[in-house]
Amino acid sequence: MESNELNSPDYEIPPELQAQVAITSLDKIYNWGRSASVWPLMFGLACCAIEMICAAASRFDIARFGMEIMRPSPRQSDLMIISGTVTKKMIPIIVRLYNQMPEPKYVLAMGACASGGGPFKEGYNVVSGVDKFIPVDVYVPGCPPTPQALLNGLMKIQEKIKGESIKTARWYQKGPDMAEIPVPMLGPDLIDPRKITLIQNGKKN
Amino acid sequence: MATPVATPAPAQTLDLPARFPGVLNPDTRPGYSGWILDNANLLKFATALRDELGYDYLSSVTAVDYLPEGKMEVVYHVYKTTGGAGVVFKIQVPRADPMEVPSLVSIYPGAELQEREAWDLFGIKFTGHPDLRRILMWEGFAGHPMRKDWHEPYFEEEAKPLKSRWPDGRMIMAESKNLFGDNISYPDGFNPESQTFDPEKALYEALRSYQKDEVGLDTDHIIVNMGPQHPSTHGVFRVAVVLDGEKIVNLKPVMGYLHRNHEKIGERNTFIMNMPYTDRLDYLSSMSNNFGYALAVEKLMNVKPTERAEYIRVMMAEMTRIASHLMAIGALLNDLGAYFTPMLYALEERELLLDIFEAVSGSRMMCNYFRFGGVARDLPEGTLQKIKGLFFERLPRKIEEIDRFLSENEIIRSRGIGQGVLTAEDAIKYSAAGPLLRASGIPYDVRRAEPYSIYDRFEFDVVVRTNGDIYDRLMVRFDEIRQSIRIVQQAVKQLPNGPVMALKPMYQVRVPPGEAYGRVEGPKGELGFYVISNGKPTPWRYHVRAPSFINLTAFGPICIGQKLADVVAVLGSIDIVLGEVDR
């Protein structure tokens, strides 16, 4: 981190120590570390996953942002890149993976399908956007987004991380936000446990 | 100019009705071909076709719902692995539940997954099928979605363009019309709290139905699920295996996690609207997919692309093959444990090919470049120079380099040679296609067996290896890249000048009624499009014969008896793309 990016509190540092000592806030140093080591979940859904692989390869080189360590296990990852069409058959697994990720966790919806269903929205097995079930931090448009667009989205995640504070961070607080998301079930169609009363009262349309 | 090389043996004039008197009725609907037969004669006819006439390769099985006529039809396409034209035969059943058709699995085991798909999407019961479960949707899903009278939750109209979009242009969100504000609908009186159904039960029952080995110790067998979130399944693919220690005693592929309803959406779309959707089938080789679909619709329209367009098409299809095989090689090496290093070499070359795709079509992956009667636009300035540089200088050298690094490697040899063997007979039996078939010693390549486009003008070899193991499948891909480079080199030299479109540009093409089956040799194998038109702007039936999907029929038989760790390597060597498996 450049010294001009640090907070400049009013503490006077003696000139002979200025090369060795810098004063900053805990938030800044903590977020700097976090934002430069976001480990994505190694999780490819569809076409966008190929562009995600290309972003990790030599030409685009995701490693420049400290994000090259893709973990296949949700327990070890901070960022979930939803790279492709979310189907009704797949969404229970995605929600379960999301629940298994430790806080702090972020979600990036890559491409049109993950953001809102995309070209396949009308399909009977397609969920119209992953944000119907899990909270999304950054949406990246495109079908598929180029690796440059994905990198831009990842930089937005970094910006978001840098704006957070330990004191107010959600994952250090107690409250409903920490609750797990109920896992959808497969029945005659997809059943969202949060909508059960609506389904019981609803008639066939 | 290269001399045209050996074309397949001229199609023999088969007198099928004389051979099967009273069994076959010719399909006389305008634009249709093939034979219609009865349920009772199907098995006898298919056995004779395979054993006496040599039609040993079942390419495609699919169903068509003729709702207005009140019947369903099952369509079979069979070919000879020695080449030549195929035979199409059909079974018609009245449209009433239950619809029963004898299963062909006992004669052509390659029908297994395809019949399951027809059961899942159309509700046709194949009697005698060993494992008739739903395949793309889950057990318990309400209805059979490809039936014409089944409507999806976001249903607006039977055909596009939707009136709400055009000509009125007042777009309404599909959610706002749905009762739940979401893409869901339930049968009448459904109460989720009273549901006790387990969608996984049928799978585990099918897994347990195997012959227990009576010899030796009686050990406990355990069931292990790999995927759908697993780094080695190349996407959202799931493998359920029964293990005896490390040894696999039974294996079932589970798919549908990326079932994006290509066929249902495709039957609402107009013909040209489907072109970008084909890109997203096998998303590593969009140009090949375009090619297959364009061929099928051009057959119906009776249009011939211009000369220059034909050459550009072949060049693009072969470049796609190289890009796809590079990815396959890199991914297989990932699966064998060479984490990401060979992949980086492969992706470096693939990026250069993607640059060319981006230059000609505007997109790296989803090219949407082919049109009926040609291609969307001519090669931009300087692209030909770039292709020449790549194909005469860089690629031949780089492929040899990657080959040198990999093919003598001790780990690849010991994990590949003699492992995951698929014999020649089994490969034909299970309707395997592409590198999987050719690595088993069957020199079957649609480009040569039934040449389409202008492939009869090029000199190239049909790559074949004889052992049918993982190593041979890897080597076949290297050899095919070399042959594709040869084809592109010839095409660049012969490329004529002229227009790239045979038709005037139009928003909607007029397609006369009829059926067509267009097949190309995609990177993964034989890619077929079965399209039926009834003269309307949208296809009545749009079916994709996906090579990745059908190649998985052989996946279980290859793996049974192997160790668990080899499943990953076998899967990598089959090279599936989930967009195409699930469609």
Image: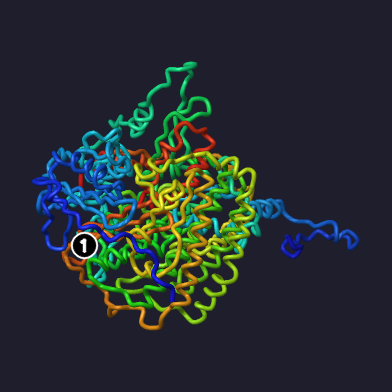
Identified at 23% across, 64% down, the residue is B160
For this rendering, which residue is in front, B54 or B205? Answer: B54
Image coordinates for residue A59, horizontal then vertical, percent:
61, 64
Identified at 22% across, 61% down, the residue is B539
For this rendering, which residue is in front, B473 or A36? Answer: B473
Q: Find residue B31 and report its image quarter.
A: bottom left
Image coordinates for residue B193, horizontal then vertical, percent:
30, 32
Circle 1 packing at 10 Å, graded few (<14), some (14-19), many (20+), is some
Question: Left or right of B446: which side holds B66?
Answer: left
For this rendering, which residue is in front, A147 or B79? Answer: B79
Q: Inspect this view and state whether residue A177 appears.
A: no
Q: Find residue B335 and report its image quarter.
A: top right
Image coordinates for residue B151, horizontal then vertical, percent:
22, 51
Identified at 48% across, 64% down, the residue is B484
Q: Inspect this view and state whether residue B223 appears.
A: yes
Tag 1: amino acid: Ala
Which residue, given by chain and number where applicable, does mark 1 sit on? B159
Question: Left or right of B371: which side holds A4?
Answer: right
Chain identity of mark 1:
B
